[in-house]
């Protein structure tokens, strides 16, 4: 999904910085356009600060921040592992907070910016991993606190909340029989009868960081083929 988002932004004329713990430079090289790959850990404040400083030194501004890093270790309430719980909240919630924090000086200097964080329909409940659902609900709360504060600097802050996205990563990470069944249940639960594709999320992100969305802030935009209206899908 990150590749689709980066491609959409490059197509719209953005220069794109990719930040990841590993493989960021290689991923940047695979894209067509002006890109920068930085290997950094969004859960480590010093690493985040250094990455933002590198972008500032290279390009002098950050017009849009897309928080897309995320993990989803499998667990239930009964077998919840504290280490996995803390790691999930660190990546999915603390990471976006640190990224926004260290972009603020640039936004103040340049007079505005955009933030789009990738959430999930499970912020409403019904997910199968408590830590992931809690982190995505927390991301909505963070967004609605950040939007009025950063709005005074001309920054909009929103969440894009997909359902199950049909990516190779999601399809390959579990037992094929389970995935086939799960995908079928998602498609059946959708009023549109289909799954969400990476390009659907990417197009929504591209809209929210554009001037066409300049008066949209503090919102959760569901890109879920209507499954956010369905009962819990497990």
Image (cartoon, rainbow, N blue to C red):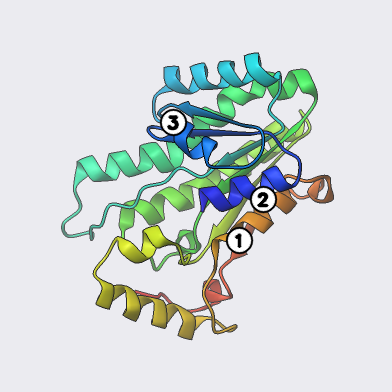
Disc 1 element? helix
Give the quarter of the image for residue 222: bottom right
- Please identify, in this view, whether the residue under mark 1 or under mark 3 is nearer the observer: 1
Q: Is residue 218 visible?
A: no
Q: Badge 2 is on which residue?
A: 8
Residue farthest along the left direction in this orientation: 79
Query: Which numbered disc covers residue 199?
Result: 1
Give the quarter of the image for residue 133: bottom left
Residue 44, horizontal then vertical, whole percent? 39, 24
Q: Badge 3 is on which residue?
A: 42
Using the image, determine if residue 152 lies above or below residue 131.
above
Q: CA distance from mark 1 to mark 3?
A: 24 Å
The answer to whether marks 1 and 2 mark residues whose Cβ atoms lie closer than 8 Å is yes
Give the quarter of the image for residue 110: top right
Residue 43, horizontal then vertical, whole percent? 39, 30
Residue 161, horizontal then vertical, whole percent? 55, 58
């Amino acid at each position: 999904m990150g590749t689709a988002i980066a491609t959409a932004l490059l197509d719209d004329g953005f220069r794109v910085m990719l930040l990841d713990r590993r493989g960021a430079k290689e991923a940047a090289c695979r894209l067509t356009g002006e890109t920068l790959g930085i290997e950094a850990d969004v859960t480590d404040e010093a690493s985040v600060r250094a990455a933002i400083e590198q972008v500032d030194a290279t390009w002098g501004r950050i017009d849009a921040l897309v928080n897309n890093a995320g993990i989803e270790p499998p667990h239930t309430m009964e077998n919840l592992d504290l280490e996995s719980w803390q790691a999930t909240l660190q990546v999915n919630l603390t990471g976006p907070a640190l990224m926004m924090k260290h972009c603020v000086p640039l936004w103040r200097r340049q007079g505005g910016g955009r933030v789009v964080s990738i959430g999930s329909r499970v912020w409403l409940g019904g997910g199968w991993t408590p830590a992931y659902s809690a982190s995505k609900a927390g991301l909505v709360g963070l967004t609605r606190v950040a939007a009025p504060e950063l709005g005074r600097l001309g920054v909009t802050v929103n969440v894009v909340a997909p359902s199950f996205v049909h990516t190779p990563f999601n399809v390959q990470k579990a037992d094929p029989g389970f995935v086939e069944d799960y995908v079928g249940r998602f498609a059946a639960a959708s009023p549109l009868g289909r799954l969400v594709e990476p390009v659907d999320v990417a197009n929504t992100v591209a809209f929210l960081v554009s001037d066409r969305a300049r008066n949209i802030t503090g919102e959760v935009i569901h890109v879920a083929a209507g499954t956010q209206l369905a009962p819990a899908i497990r």
